[in-house]
C-alpha cells in the first residue's frame, strides 16, 4: 500500500469531524471519497495533506509515519493537493503558476538567482522544460501566456491539476475537480484524471458527481457525519443500503 490512514480523528471544539477513519490507498489506483455535505471529506484531505493536525490517528506513506508533517514536507514526499476553490495566482500567467508549482523540487536560493549560478541556470532550464511538458499534458499549451484571471472555470481546474503535477507527485489528492463545470467539461477532466493514472500517479479524489465517480473510481470510501460507513468497488457501493439511505435518502445511485 502506498498510503495508509489509520483511525484518523479530528475534533473541533467538541464537534467530531472525522472519527477513526481508516483506509488504504494502493499504488496506481483511483480512490473516491464520497458523502453528503458536512460528512468530513475535505477535513480528511486536510489531515492527510498536513493542512490540519489530527486529534488522533496515523498517516503512513510508503510505511513512513508522516502524521503531523507540514504541507511542504508532505509535498516533498510526493503528496500533491488541489482544493474545491482553485488556489491560483490570478495576476500571473499560466506558465508562471506552473513554474511556482515546481519550486518544491528546486534548490536555487537568493544568491544563486542574484549571481546566475550554474545551479540557477540548470534549474531554470529544468523548470522551463517541465512547464512545457505540463502544458502539453493538461492540454493548455496555447494558454501559456494567458493570465489566470482570463481563464474559464474549466481551464482553471485543469491548471490546478497541472500545478499539482509539477511537483512530481506519487499521490494526487483532488478535492471536487469538476465542481462548477458542465458535463462536457466534466468528461474532459475525467479523461485528464485517467491520464494521470496512466502516467503512474495514484489518485484520491472527493467528488459529488456520482456518475463520474462510478465510471472513474477503482474503489470508493463513503463518509457520513464523520464516520466511514462503507468501502468497496463501485458496483458494491451502488447497491449498499446504508450508502443509499445516508447519501441519497433512499434513491439508487447506479
Image (spheres, rainbow, N blue to C red):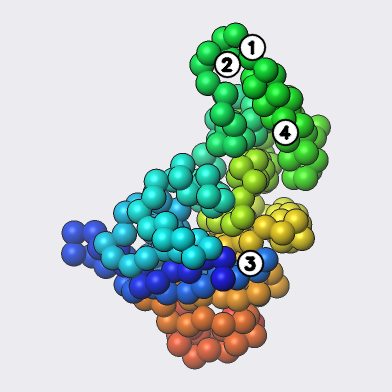
In the visual, does 113 lie left or right of 193? left
Q: Mark 3 points at which residue?
A: 27
Quadrant housing the N terminus: bottom right
Q: Mark 4 points at which residue?
A: 131
Which mark is in front, 3 or 1? Answer: 1
Q: Is mark 3 on a helix, strand or loop?
A: loop
Between 24 and 12, the residue placed more toward the observer is 24
Name of the residue lying farthest toward the left: 14
Dot 3 and dot 4 residues touching (CB under 8 Å)? no
User: Mark 3 to mark 1: distance in Å?
Assistant: 39 Å
User: Mark 2 to mark 1: distance in Å?
Assistant: 6 Å
Q: Name the residue under label 2.
A: 112
The crowding category of the residue bearing disc 4, from other C-alpha atoms within 10 Å (few below 14, some 14 to 19, many at least 20), is: many
Quadrant housing the C terminus: bottom right
Q: Residue at the location (57% across, 16% down)?
A: 112
Mark 3 or 1, nearer chain start? 3
Dot 2 and dot 1 residues touching (CB under 8 Å)? yes
Q: Is residue 87 above or below residue 18?
A: above
Dot 1 and dot 4 residues touching (CB under 8 Å)? no
Name of the residue lying farthest toward the top: 115
Q: Mark 1 points at which residue?
A: 116
Mark 4 or 2, nearer chain start? 2
Q: Is residue 169 above or below residue 150?
A: below
Q: Residue 120: horizontal and vertical position, in percent?
A: 64, 20
Q: Is residue 183 above or below residue 33?
A: above
Dot 3 and dot 1 residues touching (CB under 8 Å)? no
Amino acid at each position: 500500500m502506498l498510503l495508509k490512514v489509520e483511525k484518523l480523528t479530528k475534533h473541533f471544539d467538541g464537534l467530531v469531524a472525522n472519527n477513526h477513519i481508516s483506509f488504504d490507498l494502493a499504488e496506481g489506483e483511483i480512490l473516491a471519497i464520497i458523502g453528503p455535505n458536512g460528512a468530513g471529506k475535505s477535513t480528511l484531505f486536510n489531515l492527510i495533506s498536513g493542512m490540519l493536525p489530527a486529534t488522533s490517528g496515523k498517516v503512513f506513506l510508503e510505511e513512513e509515519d508522516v502524521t503531523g508533517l507540514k504541507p511542504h514536507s508532505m509535498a516533498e514526499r510526493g503528496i500533491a493537493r488541489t482544493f474545491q476553490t482553485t488556489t491560483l495566482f490570478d495576476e500571473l500567467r499560466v506558465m508562471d503558476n506552473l513554474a511556482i508549482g515546481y519550486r518544491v523540487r528546486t534548490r536555487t536560493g537568493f544568491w544563486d538567482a542574484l549571481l546566475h549560478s550554474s545551479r540557477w541556470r540548470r534549474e531554470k532550464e529544468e523548470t522551463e522544460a517541465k512547464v512545457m511538458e505540463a502544458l502539453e499534458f493538461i492540454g493548455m499549451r496555447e494558454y501559456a501566456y494567458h493570465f489566470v484571471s482570463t481563464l474559464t472555470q474549466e481551464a482553471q481546474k485543469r491548471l490546478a491539476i497541472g500545478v499539482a503535477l509539477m511537483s512530481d507527485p506519487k499521490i494526487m489528492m483532488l478535492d471536487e475537480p469538476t465542481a462548477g463545470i458542465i458535463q462536457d467539461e466534466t468528461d474532459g477532466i475525467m479523461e485528464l484524471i485517467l491520464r494521470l493514472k496512466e502516467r503512474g500517479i495514484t489518485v484520491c479524489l472527493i467528488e459529488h458527481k456520482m456518475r463520474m465517480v462510478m465510471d472513474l473510481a477503482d474503489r470508493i470510501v463513503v463518509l457520513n457525519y464523520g464516520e466511514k460507513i462503507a468501502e468497496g468497488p463501485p458496483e458494491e457501493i451502488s447497491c449498499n443500503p446504508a450508502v443509499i439511505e445516508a447519501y441519497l435518502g433512499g434513491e439508487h445511485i447506479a
